[in-house]
């Protein structure tokens, strides 16, 4: 008959199993975090590209419509409302899902109102004005996306630096 072990020490095999299990769980958590972050960035980039593309098509189509001097204000209103509503739908989706605002409300307001001013002008300056509005909108989209992208990058860097500093303080 074997005697029960009265020693309070743990068997090294069990300690190794516990430690390796903890390390595996930490690895899975870290891997899951990296995967989620990459997916979020890819999805954001895809939606940003979609919004940029929709905006570019909107401005190109608007310029074509404005070439015909028989364009009525009601037709322009229907066109702008329809196209901008789709862009706003994507912007709202991105805002709710990822908390990023690619086009400000002021810029959307300019996009909605300025083409009416161009319609009333008799000179051909509407092309230059539309091009300027288009490029400022596309530039805003890229700048806001870049700011969001590197803000998240800095968050990780700051977190790692804080952990390093804490470990140094403990030693």
Image: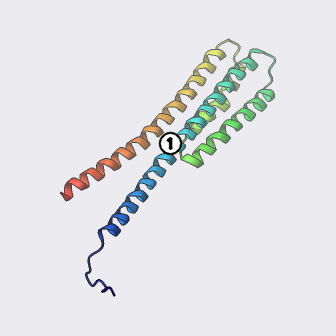
Name the outermost residue toward the front: 1
Which residue corresponds to the image point at 55% horizontal and 38% vertical from the top-left? 42
Image vertical order of residue 96 relative to residue 132, above or below:
below
Which residue corresponds to the image point at 61% horizontal and 30% vertical from the top-left? 52
Of 87 and 73, which appears nearest the observer?
Answer: 87
Quadrant containing the N terminus in the rendered view:
bottom left
Count how many numbered circles sit on residues in the image.
1
Of 32 and 76, which appears nearest the observer?
Answer: 32
Quadrant containing the C terminus in the rendered view:
bottom left
Q: Quadrant of residue 66?
A: top right
Picture coordinates of residue 138 (x, y %)?
56, 27
Name the outermost residue toward the left: 171
Of 9 and 116, which appears nearest the observer?
Answer: 9
Picture coordinates of residue 116 (x, y %)?
70, 26
Name the outermost residue toward the top: 124
Mark 1 neighbour class, 10 Å CA radius: few under 14, some 14 to 19, many 20 or more: few
Q: Quadrant of residue 6?
A: bottom left
In this rendering, position of residue 4 left or right of residue 153: left
Local secondary structure at mark 1: helix
Of 112 and 168, which appears nearest the observer?
Answer: 168
Picture coordinates of residue 90 (x, y %)?
65, 40
> Which scheme is used to colour this image of the protein?
rainbow
Picture coordinates of residue 117 (x, y %)?
68, 24
Which residue corresponds to the image point at 76% horizontal and 27% vertical from the top-left? 76
Image vertical order of residue 101 relative to residue 2, above or below:
above
Image vertical order of residue 162 relative to residue 59, above or below:
below
Which residue corresponds to the image point at 67% horizontal and 36% vertical from the top-left? 87
In this rendering, position of residue 12 left or right of residue 84: left
In this rendering, position of residue 43 left or right of residue 163: right
Which residue is tagged 1? 38
């Amino acid at each position: 008959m074997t005697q029960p072990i009265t020693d309070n020490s743990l068997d090294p095999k069990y300690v190794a199993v516990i430690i390796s299990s903890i390390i595996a769980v930490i690895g899975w958590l870290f891997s899951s975090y990296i995967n989620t972050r990459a997916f979020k960035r890819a999805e954001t980039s895809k939606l940003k590209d979609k919004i940029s593309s929709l905006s570019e098509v909107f401005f190109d189509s608007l310029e074509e419509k404005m070439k015909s001097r028989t364009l009525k204000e009601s037709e322009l209103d229907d066109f702008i409302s329809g196209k901008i509503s789709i862009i706003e739908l994507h912007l709202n989706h991105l805002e709710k899902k990822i908390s990023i605002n690619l086009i400000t409300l002021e810029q959307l307001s300019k996009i909605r109102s300025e083409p009416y001013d161009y319609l009333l002008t008799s000179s051909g300056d509407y092309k230059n004005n539309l091009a300027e509005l288009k490029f400022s909108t596309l530039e805003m989209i890229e700048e806001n996306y870049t700011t969001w992208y590197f803000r998240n990058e800095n968050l990780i860097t700051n977190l790692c630096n804080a952990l390093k500093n804490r470990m140094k303080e403990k030693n």
